[in-house]
Amino acid sequence: EIPVKSEEEEEEEEGKNDEGQEGKVAADNDDLDILLGDNTHNTFSDEDNAGSSADVELAISRAEHLTSRRPLLLNRVLLRQNPHNVGEWIKRSQLYLALGEEDMAAEALEESLKAVSARKSVNGSPCTLVLTLVDILENRRKNVDGARNVLERICTKDEYDFADSEDLAQCHTAWVEFELRHENWDAALNLARRATSGKKSSKAARGLSRSLRLWNLLFDLEESLGTVQTTKDAYDRALESKVATPSHVLNYAAFLKDRKYFEESFAAYERGMGLFPFPHAGAILLWKNYLTNFLERYGGSKTPRARELFDRCLADCPPEESPEFFLQYGDYEETHGLTKRALGVYERMCASVPPSEKYAAYRLYIAKAIHYLGIASARPIYESAISSLDDGPASRICLEYAKMETGLREKDRARTVLVYGAQLADPRRDPDYWKAWHEFEISHGNEETFREMLRVKRSVQAAFSTVNYNAAEMGGGVPRVDTLTEESALEMIAEREGVEVDKLNQPLIGGFVSGKKRTAEVADLGEVERRAARLRQVTGAAESGASAAAGGGDDEIDIDDIDGNEEEEEKQAPPPLPPSTKNVKGVSEKAIPAAVFGGLTASSGDSES
């Protein structure tokens, strides 16, 4: 039966409730008065003074406690706004640790694992929550079993759903390192093997089999704690699953080499090059170590196999990386093979390397050919180099070729090489070439060859007169020379030839030079014949001087005498006829008076009659 209350009893209960609420409000008002410093009561009795002092101390202690808990309360407000803020959960545990409340710090992190979603987490990785909790349990509370239990729940029981497999890999790595710190060697090795097995249910757990962090840890543990066979199995699993990197292949081969498994180490290199062929950057390291270890192991005992390896490498190697392998191949042939094969390797190098390396490759090839076959064998190599190189390196090769021919006393061949290389050397950018040719003609030439050199130089200057270079090309190690315009080039040529340039007849199209550059005196046929006669006289004098030098010593050529003869011939030559004024615009003709001719007209008339 349900008891029925009377109206009087209900009124008594309502009165008591009202009195209790009034008492609470009064107590709150008293506390507020104490905190705010209410001074409305000016007279107190002794009992009232004692009670008020106690209330003041209580209020002060409450205020201090509230102030000390302010960071935690503020942190709680931020976590209520966003419970997936990893950084704030870590900060909350640190605040508890600062207050000496280690249990509360661990409880806060346990609560964070339930509140934080891995896909919504911000300001940090969820794995840091686990690692921080393990650190507190292991180092602060000295609870090793509790820390191990946390790692087991996270790694094996999938208590927390990670979005990224790398976060879960960090937890597995922390578990293995935890067991290593407590000297549980077998447990740590088994944990690493199980983590990389790939037999997991969740998506993040299945991605552990491709985590380089775990594979590196497994390889280190196998090499230090496992056997040779288990280590080989681990590396083979990584190669089969295509997780291994070039550094793993190198470590595997070095491990087998240290244990005297040479052929298996070479097989590891072969598998690695199958995974990382050219142009992969790792292929260069693999081939370098493979060839070096093979030659170190067998030397010249397995020459055909070594040649096959070099040919395979160079067949796929990019031109930019090939010079080092060509040099190693050539050195091997010089040491253990045939000279002809070594020179063939250097010839292939000259054809395969990039253009920037061809000059050095040809110089090496020439040096090796001279060393093994003699100096005369370098002539076809020089010719091939000149035809293959760019203008700058080709001109330098021409100088070396001419120097070699000069050493063999083949001066005509050297001069021919210099004439051919002159078309490749711009006097503005390559003054050393012309200086070398100038010294050659002074030492081994005569006046005619010297004049020929000057003529070639003028023609080359005219050919390069309209070529412009930028500041970078003209600045690096080359003297600054102002760019020649067409006008300046014509004036320079006219000054050297001794003619005048008709500026009014210059072409309007750039790059063409007017053909009517000489005056009427030069256009006169008689003047042309006189100049040709002087040139034949100078040539005959040069030949007679050369024959006299061959018979009785070297005499210097006196150019002043030749200039003096030219001046005398010019004085003796008749004055040039005035140019004809026929068909000249703006000029009219007029009959000449007979008195001007005097008796010439009469004598001419008599003769006609």
Image: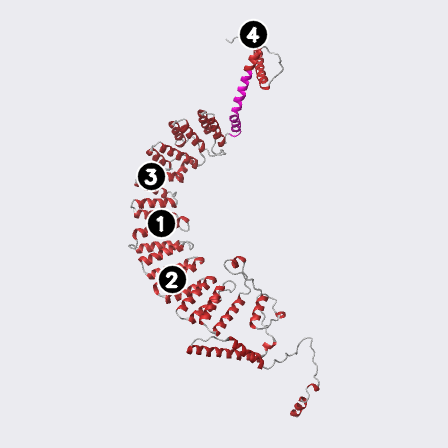
Mark 2 vs mark 1: which is more N-terminal? 1
Q: Decide: few, some or many residues near mark 2? Use Cα within 10 Å; few <14, some 14-19, many ≥20.
A: some
Left or right side of 303 for 409:
right
* Amino acid at the residue labelled 4: Glu
Secondary structure beneath disc 4? Answer: helix
Sequence-first disc among 3 and 1: 3
Which label belongs to residue 289? 1
- Taking depth in this image into account, of 79 and 7 the one nearest to the observer is 79
Q: CB of mark 4 within 8 Å of CB of mark 1?
A: no
Between disc 2 and disc 3, the foreground one is 2
Is residue 84 in view? no
User: Which circle's residue, 2 or 3, is located before the other in the chain?
Assistant: 3
Q: Magenta stretch mostly in which secondary structure? A: helix
Q: Against 193, is 321 above or below? A: below
Name the residue carrying label 3.
Answer: 222
Q: Which residue is mark 2?
A: 367
Q: Earlier in the sequence, mark 2 or mark 4?
A: 4
